[in-house]
Amino acid sequence: DVKVTQSSRYLVKRTGEKVFLECVQDMDHENMFWYRQDPGLGLRLIYFSYDVKMKEKGDIPEGYSVSREKKERFSLILESASTNQTSMYLCASRNTGAGGELFFGEGSRLTVL
Amino acid sequence: AQTVTQSQPEMSVQEAETVTLSCTYDTSESDYYLFWYKQPPSRQMILVIRQEAYKQQNATENRFSVNFQKAAKSFSLKISDSQLGDAAMYFCAYLSNFGNEKLTFGTGTRLTIIP
């Protein structure tokens, strides 16, 4: 079974803390994505990576950074967490190419107090 | 930039009945893909169905089918013989075929199945 694994299903952090969300895929996909999911807003793209050490900003990159040191791993970093970053974070991956399916992890629900 | 609109935040249907979820999109491109994804409660998002814009024939996957109207930029999902396991959030998504690997998602429709 193909898999995208997110390291934490639930996290509770305090304002100002540094937060790492880890994502690993076992499908050798070139492209990896971090989305944020909020009720009524759907999925919004934070960052994506199309190759190791390569990244591009999505629609809402402010307050976030990413790291992709290995092909299978894509990390989302909140340098200084704020309460408005309380959300569900979804990692996904897909191959480059026309119409390729996006595979998702189970999500990480982050609460910032 | 492309936009995807799902105008029905919530829908409900009786078990075994048919329901249609709406999706419209805005693009100036002629070659693209459209998707419906399903997110069951507390479970990961999975692909339901995919449509290539240059194919006129509507995609079908078992009980799931789409009505793709390219000129109207409409892409609705029809679920026939609804089952309890169909209860989920459904997201419509757009993918350009011009080198941009990003999917753009709608805001989702929560589907409830009434036993």
Image: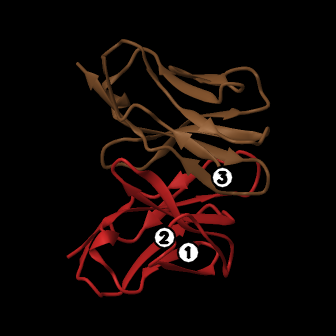
Few, some or many C-alpha atoms within 10 Å of disc 3 (few <14, some 14-19, many ≥20)? few
Query: Residue A107's image quarter?
Result: bottom left
State the SS at label 2: strand
- Which label number is shown at residue A73? 1
Q: Residue B75: image x %, image y %? A: 59, 28
What residue do we see at 45% from left, 47% from top?
B45
What residue do we see at 73% from left, 57% from top?
B100
- Which label number is shown at residue A23? 2
Q: In this view, does B24 lie above or below B16?
A: below
Q: Are marks 1 and 2 on the same chain?
A: yes
Q: Do the residues labelled 1 and 2 touch (CB within 8 Å)?
A: yes
Answer with left or right where residue B59 lies relative to residue B76: right
Query: Residue A105's image quarter?
Result: bottom left
Q: Do the residues labelled 3 and 1 touch (CB within 8 Å)?
A: no
Colour representing chain A: red
State the SS at label 3: loop
State the SS at label 1: strand
Dot 2 amino acid type: Cys
Residue situated furthest left in the rendering? A113
Q: From the image, tell me which residue sits under label 3.
A: B1
Q: Residue B80: image x %, image y %? A: 45, 16
Q: Mark 2 or mark 1, which is nearer the start of the sequence?
A: 2
Q: Is residue B16 above or below residue A103?
A: above
What residue do we see at 31% from left, 78% from top?
A82
Few, some or many C-alpha atoms within 10 Å of disc 2 (few <14, some 14-19, many ≥20)? many
Subunit under mark 2:
A
Colour representing chain B: brown
Q: Do labels 3 and 1 share a chain?
A: no
Q: Which colour scheme is used?
A: by chain
